Amino acid sequence: EVPQGLVNQLQMNGEEMLKSVAAETGAQLILRQDTRNFGYSLVLFSGTATATNAAKEKLQAKLGLTKSASIIKSVDLLSRN
């Protein structure tokens, strides 16, 4: 979850921050604003566990969030081949 007040930083320059984190880590990041009326938006991460963990840490650092200042919910999805 990203506080709504920080979402503008994610959207600047064609979502440049999300794209740079994705490029650096190999994870895919998607911004969902379905919950913006509740005061937060969601960033969905997909990829390997290593890539998604690195992406979460980098995004939190770029937004100036500490782990205690944000809420992270993880949902593990299994792919079927």
Image: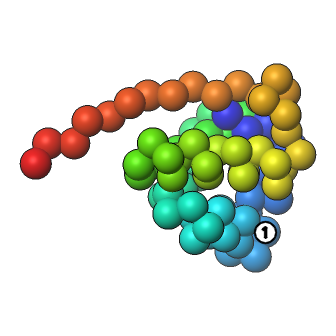
**In the picture, residue 1 is in which quadrant?**
top right
* Whether residue 53 is visible: yes
Point out the residue furthest to the front here. 50
Q: Is residue 64 left or right of residue 40?
A: right
Q: Position of residue 15 (x, y in %)?
A: 68, 68
Q: What kind of residue is marked 1?
A: Met
Please tell me how crowded label 1 is: few (under 14), some (14-19), or many (20+) other residues with Cα within 10 Å: few
From this view, report whether residue 53 is shown above or below residue 70.
below
* Whether residue 43 is visible: no
| Residue at image location 78% in from the left, 29% down from the top | 67
- Colour basis: rainbow
Instruction: State the residue in front, 47 or 11.
Output: 47
- Residue under circle 1? 12
The number of discs equals: 1
From this view, report whether residue 16 is shown above or below residue 80.
below
| Residue at image location 10% in from the left, 48% down from the top | 81
| Residue at image location 71% in from the left, 25% down from the top | 71
From this view, report whether residue 5 is shown above or below residue 70.
below
Q: Position of residue 63 (x, y in %)?
A: 84, 50
| Residue at image location 84% in from the left, 34% down from the top | 66
From this view, report whether residue 18 is shown above or below residue 36.
below
User: Judging from the image, what secondary structure is the residue with disc 1 in?
Assistant: helix
Q: Is residue 27 left or right of residue 72?
A: left
Point out the residue furthest to the left here. 81
Q: Is residue 28 left or right of residue 17?
A: left
Point out the residue furthest to the bottom here. 13
